[in-house]
């Protein structure tokens, strides 16, 4: 597909606009000036006719003729010869072919005339005023008047003179366009090129942008028209980086979350291989099958949690029973609890503690908190889970008698790949990061506190009453 340069397109658009605007303006200006020129020349022609009449009136040679014509004492009927006007050469140009006049007395007898108009017939009453005539192959503009003494004056001008002025007007209006339009096109191209520099700067910034960068795109002196584009690009980059981060986190979460069910499955299969009788083997295989079922469910929950984190189902909450969710997680982790030889208890004030939430997120929250507690509690230790509701929130508390987390480290352990300093094995790495994200989906607060016994850690999660399921009544 052929690509068109935006700079060239804008340049041609500007030139087209200039042509569309300037040519009609030039035509209108030419018509107005041509009309004014004709009016001015007509006025000059009329003024010249009146001036010629006054000169003839005051001519001594004509005064006698006019007196006789008006009934004077010395009336002479013999005609005088027609006098030829003497034309003047101005600036080496003889204007005689272009202008001329005739003068007649009251009896329409010729008094004076120029050579180029002496053959014209005597003007009649209908010839008074302005008229266009054809004479000797030329077109003339004439003005005829009769003064108070009866003198008839006809003065004319060839259209050649007006055509010269018209050609001058045309040249005056077209020459600037012929010279100016190419110059305007060049300047418009330079102006468009300069105006598009922010786009070039934006292209350069995007080309130099490193993958994974969250630095917003910014251009010095950003034009107002580019602000929405840059704002949208920055939002898109932010969403893209969030998606990439979620993908990387999802990959790590898969490895972290699937470790326990895979380990349990391997233990059951190993027990099945070491079983001495068929009943023990079948029991171990059944347990392995159950672990694989839990593994499949765990994968589904991980995917659901990933979709929730991406915001795909942020508003799709449903009634959830915290007691049932905690019980299910404990049953799932039963092999690990038995292997660690840990005493785990679940206390709740009522059979059900309903909230409006996300099952996958709550399941991940309980599972990771319990796994972290089991990981750090020594054999023979205790893990206590308490569920209750206050006037303000539904509260989840998980306590253990492990080494705990130092107070100065508690602000950092919710970050990804952060571990406690008391144990060499991996813990508090991804687990608490998942717990934090699950709590955020429920607008819940998380606190890491000292255990009441003085040893270990107490994790307290408060889910606001806004998350309570419809139809439930808060219990103190």
Image (tube, grey):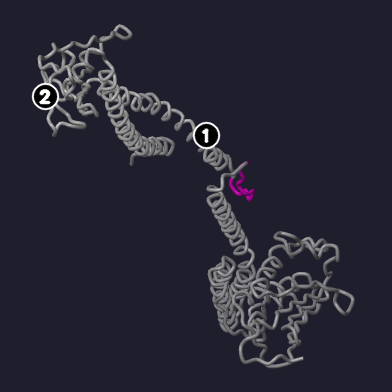
What residue appears at the point 59 percent right and 67 percent down from the top-left corner?
309
Asked which quadrant contains residue 265, the reply is bottom right
Q: Residue at x 70, y 79 (%)?
A: 463
Q: Secondary structure at mark 1?
A: helix
Q: Please state the total of marks drawn on the protein image.
A: 2
Q: Residue furthest top?
A: 92
Q: Would residue 69 be found to the left or right of residue 39 on screen?
A: left
Q: Is residue 57 above or below residue 363?
A: above
Q: Position of residue 450 (x, y in %)?
A: 85, 74
Q: Quadrant of the N terminus?
A: top left
Check disc 1 and report the residue beneath it: 194
What residue would you read off at disc 2? 122
Q: Is residue 213 magenta?
A: yes
Q: Residue furthest right?
A: 454
Which stretch is magenta?
Answer: 211-220
Q: Residue at the location (39% across, 38% down)?
A: 9
Q: Quadrant of residue 242?
A: bottom right
Relative to 181, 382 lies left or right? right
Q: Of helix, strand and loop, which one carries label 2?
A: loop
Which secondary structure is most common in the magenta stretch?
loop
Describe residue 182's horizontal placement relative to residue 146 as left or right: right
């Amino acid at each position: 597909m052929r690509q068109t340069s935006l700079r060239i397109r804008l340049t041609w658009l500007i030139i087209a606009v200039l042509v569309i605007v300037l040519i009609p303006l030039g035509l209108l200006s030419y018509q107005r000036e041509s009309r004014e020129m004709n009016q001015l020349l007509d006025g000059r022609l009329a003024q010249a006719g009146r001036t010629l009449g006054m000169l003839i009136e005051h001519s001594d040679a004509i005064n006698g003729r006019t007196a006789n014509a008006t009934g004077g004492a010395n009336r002479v009927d013999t005609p005088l010869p027609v006098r030829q006007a003497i034309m003047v050469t101005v600036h080496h140009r003889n204007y005689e072919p272009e202008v001329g006049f005739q003068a007649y007395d009251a009896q329409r007898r010729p008094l004076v005339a120029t050579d180029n108009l002496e053959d014209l017939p005597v003007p009649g009453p209908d010839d008074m005023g302005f008229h266009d005539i054809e004479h000797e192959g030329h077109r003339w503009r004439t003005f005829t008047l009769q003064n108070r003494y009866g003198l008839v004056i006809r003065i004319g001008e060839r259209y050649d003179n007006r055509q010269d002025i018209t050609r001058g007007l045309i040249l005056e209006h077209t020459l600037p366009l012929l010279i100016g339009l190419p110059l305007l096109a060049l300047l418009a191209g330079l102006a468009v090129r300069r105006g598009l520099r922010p786009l070039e700067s934006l292209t350069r910034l995007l080309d130099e942008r490193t993958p994974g960068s969250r630095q917003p795109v910014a251009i010095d002196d950003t034009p107002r028209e580019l602000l929405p584009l840059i704002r949208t690009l920055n939002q898109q980059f932010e969403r893209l980086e969030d998606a990439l981060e979620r993908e990387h986190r999802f990959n790590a979460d898969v490895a972290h979350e699937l470790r326990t069910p895979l380990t349990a499955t391997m233990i059951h299969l190993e027990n099945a291989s070491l079983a001495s009788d068929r009943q023990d083997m079948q029991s171990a295989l059944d347990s392995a099958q159950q672990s694989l079922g839990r593994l499949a469910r765990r994968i589904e929950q991980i995917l659901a949690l990933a979709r929730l984190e991406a915001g795909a189902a942020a508003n799709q909450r449903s009634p959830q029973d915290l007691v049932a969710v905690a019980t299910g997680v404990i049953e799932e982790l039963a092999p690990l609890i038995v292997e660690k030889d840990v005493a785990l208890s679940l206390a709740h004030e009522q059979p059900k503690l309903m909230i409006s939430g996300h099952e996958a997120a709550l399941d991940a929250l309980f599972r990771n908190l319990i796994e972290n507690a089991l990981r750090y509690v020594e054999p023979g230790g205790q893990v206590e889970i308490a569920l209750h509701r206050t006037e303000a929130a539904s509260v989840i508390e998980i306590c253990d008698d492990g080494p705990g987390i130092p107070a100065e480290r508690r602000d950092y352990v919710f970050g990804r790949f952060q571990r406690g300093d008391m144990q060499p094995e991996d813990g508090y790495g991804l687990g608490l990061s998942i717990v934090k994200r699950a709590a955020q989906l429920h607008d819940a607060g998380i606190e890491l506190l000292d255990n009441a016994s003085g040893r270990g850690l107490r994790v307290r999660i408060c889910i606001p009453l806004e998350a309570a399921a419809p139809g439930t009544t808060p219990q103190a």
